[in-house]
Image (cartoon, grey):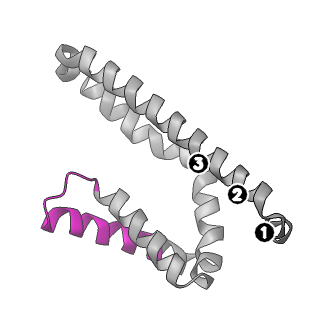
């Protein structure tokens, strides 16, 4: 579990480094996730080593939101003037996330119907 956690943190740090060095507007953890995705595509056996740890982290994901929630409450007075912008950006990003998830799900379901061999292998 420690090795898998170290791998996840390594990719997050790599993403932070890439974002910082190239002054990208994309958060480092997102870049790190993309790097991890590319690594897993190149070495699928790495997913088997990382998966149990990742699933355990996902089980406790709600605990990771506590510091962010506290930070928002502490900074509430600073963002009060930008409340409309914050609300609009949350609404737009949530709508986009739902739309993208729906489109990806639809495409995967269509692909699964077209190729029954892959759906049987996945089960």
* Disc with the residue nearer the chain's start (2 vs 1): 2
- The reply to whether dot 3 and dot 1 touch (C-beta < 8 Å) is no
- The residue drawn where x is 77% and y is 59% is 114
Percent across and percent down for residue 116 are 83, 64
Is 13 in the magenta?
Answer: yes
**What predominant SS class does the magenta segment belong to?**
helix
List the residue tagged with mark 1.
118
Q: Nearer the viewer, residue 88 or 16?
A: 88
Q: Which residue carries the number 3 mark?
A: 104
SS at mark 2 in the image: helix
Sort mark 3 into few (<14), some (14-19) or many (20+) by Cα contacts within 10 Å. few
CA gap, disc 3 and disc 1: 17 Å
Residue 4 is situated, as x and y percent measured from the top left of the image, at 53, 76
> Disc 3 vs disc 2: which is toward the camera?
2
Q: Is residue 53 above or below residue 105?
A: below
**Image position, residue 55 (x, y; %):** 64, 60
Q: Magenta segment range? A: 6-27
């Amino acid at each position: 579990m420690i090795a898998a956690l170290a791998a996840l943190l390594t990719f997050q740090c790599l993403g932070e480094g890439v974002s910082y060095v190239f002054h990208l507007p994309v958060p480092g953890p997102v870049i790190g996730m993309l790097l991890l995705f590319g690594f897993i595509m190149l070495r699928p056996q790495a997913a088997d080593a990382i998966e149990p740890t990742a699933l355990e982290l996902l089980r406790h994901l709600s605990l990771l939101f506590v510091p962010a929630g506290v930070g928002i409450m502490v900074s509430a007075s600073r963002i009060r003037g930008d409340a409309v912008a914050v609300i609009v950006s949350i609404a737009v990003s949530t709508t986009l996330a739902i739309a993208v998830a729906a489109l990806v799900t639809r495409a995967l379901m269509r692909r699964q119907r077209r190729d029954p061999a892959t759906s049987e292998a996945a089960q």
